[in-house]
Structure formats: structure tokens, C-alpha cells
Image (cartoon, rainbow, N blue to C red):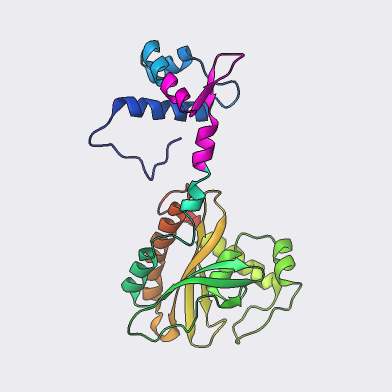
Amino acid sequence: MENKKTQHTPKYPVQTIDKALEVLEILAEEGYQEGLGISELSSRLAIGKSTVHRVLDTLSSRNYIEQCPDTKKYRLGWRLFEIGNIIPQQRNLYNFDIAILQELCNQYQETVNLGVRVENSVVTISKVSPKASLIANLQIGARESLHATAMGKALISEMTKEEIKQILGEGPLERYTTTTITEIDSLMEELRKIRKQGFSIDDEEFSPGLTCISMPVRDFNNEIVAAISVSGASIRQTYSKIENIKTGLKDATDKLSYFLGWQGEIGETSETK
């Protein structure tokens, strides 16, 4: 199972380990039903049967693979499942490297927020602000509207109309400013636009004088689990600056998504899928 984001040539490869890992990958790709025998693995690996047997014996002793008693073929073992289940505990939205947000803040000198959906609101769970700037007055733990904020719209951008109605109701939606979207049909059109372009913008829809741009964060299931936004005074958010922010924001959301196990291509946008 090749992951193009992490493939590289090691400086000092250990061939035995490399072959053992290759065995696991082959069994994951092709041996999901009955498993594979020594001859099949020998052919796929282009190494002798005796070498394959030694690799299999070692992996079996640690329960990373097992031999089916009926067919005598090999398949993945439960030890891999046990280890795999630890990964989400080590990689989640509460123990990621805050430098991902800090770098974005430093680059554009604007407030950077990380938010998740909680029921019918977006809740900010992490925030980094520039030392000297007119910043968005948004506190960690604060709840804001899904339909009127950039993070909120990014979080619900892939939901169906029925799902949106279950969360927000039939409408009309609460109005915060003169530019707030208040009708469900208008919101759905906005979400279609967000899916196509890969980012959302809150142009003074929640707070007068405040503009935000946001992109979604995905997990190992390719599901949207969070969003990162860059927000600041509207007067500073020129077209040129927003275009630049989009580049940095994409890099930040890619990094955090990758940390959470996302398997997409770095730099990929909705327009290139």
C-alpha cells in the first residue's frame, strides 16, 4: 500500500526488515481472503523460498501474521490490529504540533483558529494570535455559527441538504450581519461552491469588519473532522493577501490532515481531484 507522501529511499536500508514489511504489504493487498503461500510470496518478492520462510517464521512468532491451519497459507495477524488502534490515540486534534498553526500566524500576521463541529455550532479548540495586530476576538471554547463563519461552512461543506436541516433546522437561519446567509437553499449553493474551490470565506457574515478564510482538516477516513481559519480585519484582507493565505492554509491543513492519517495527495485541491 504505497503512500506517496512518505516514500523515500533510506540511506542505510536493512534488507531483511524491508522484505518483512513488503510481506505485510503484499498480504494486506492480496491475501485478504485465503492468504498467500510461500511459493506465491517467493514469486512476488523475487527471493528464495527458504528466505521467505524465515521471514514468515519471524513475523509469526510476534503474531504479526498467522498461518491458516486448513490451507497452510499466511495472512495478517491480530497484533497489527492492536498496534494500529493505538495510532488514533497518539495522533489526534489535542496532541498535534501547535507549530502548524504558529507558522501560519507568523507568515500572515493574522489570527489562526482550529475548530470542530459540536452539535449545531463550531467550537474553537486552539488559537494562535499575532503579537501586534488588530485580531479577531475569539476565545478558545467559544461557540459560533456554522452557517455564518468560514470554519463552520468548511466543516459542513460535504453534508447533504437533509443533514443540514437536521442540524440547523428548516430556516430561516439567524442573521448576524447584512451579509449573513439565512436561507437553506442559499447555504447549499454556498457549500457547493466551497466543495469546488476547496476553501470557505466569511466576508463579514458573522462580525462586521472581520473576514475569515478556512479549509477543512481530514482524518484517516477522509472525513472532515476540523477546520483551520485565518481571520483578521477586513480592511487588511486584499485579494492578493487572500490568495497568498490560501497557499499557506492549504499547507497547514495538509500537514494536520496527514498527522491524522489522511491518505490524500499533499497539495491536492478539490479542483484537481
Number of marks: 0
The magenta span reads 56-84
Q: Residue furthest right?
A: 170
Q: Quadrant of residue 179?
A: bottom right
Q: Is residue 80 magenta?
A: yes
Between 65 and 18, the residue placed more toward the observer is 65
Between 235 and 95, the residue placed more toward the observer is 95
Q: Residue furthest front?
A: 61
Q: Quadrant of residue 205?
A: bottom right
**Residue under the point 53% across and 44% down:** 85
**Residue under the point 36% across and 69% down:** 102
Instruction: Provide residue 168's location: percent of width, then percent of height.
Output: 71, 71
Instruction: Provide residue 162's location: percent of width, then percent of height.
Output: 74, 62
125 w.r.t. 218: above or below: below
22 w.r.t. 165: above or below: above
**Residue under the point 42% across and 84% down:** 135
209 w.r.t. 201: above or below: below
Instruction: Provide residue 248's location: percent of width, then percent of height.
Output: 37, 65
Instruction: Provide residue 175's location: percent of width, then percent of height.
Output: 65, 84
Between 183 and 54, the residue placed more toward the observer is 54
Q: Is residue 62 magenta?
A: yes
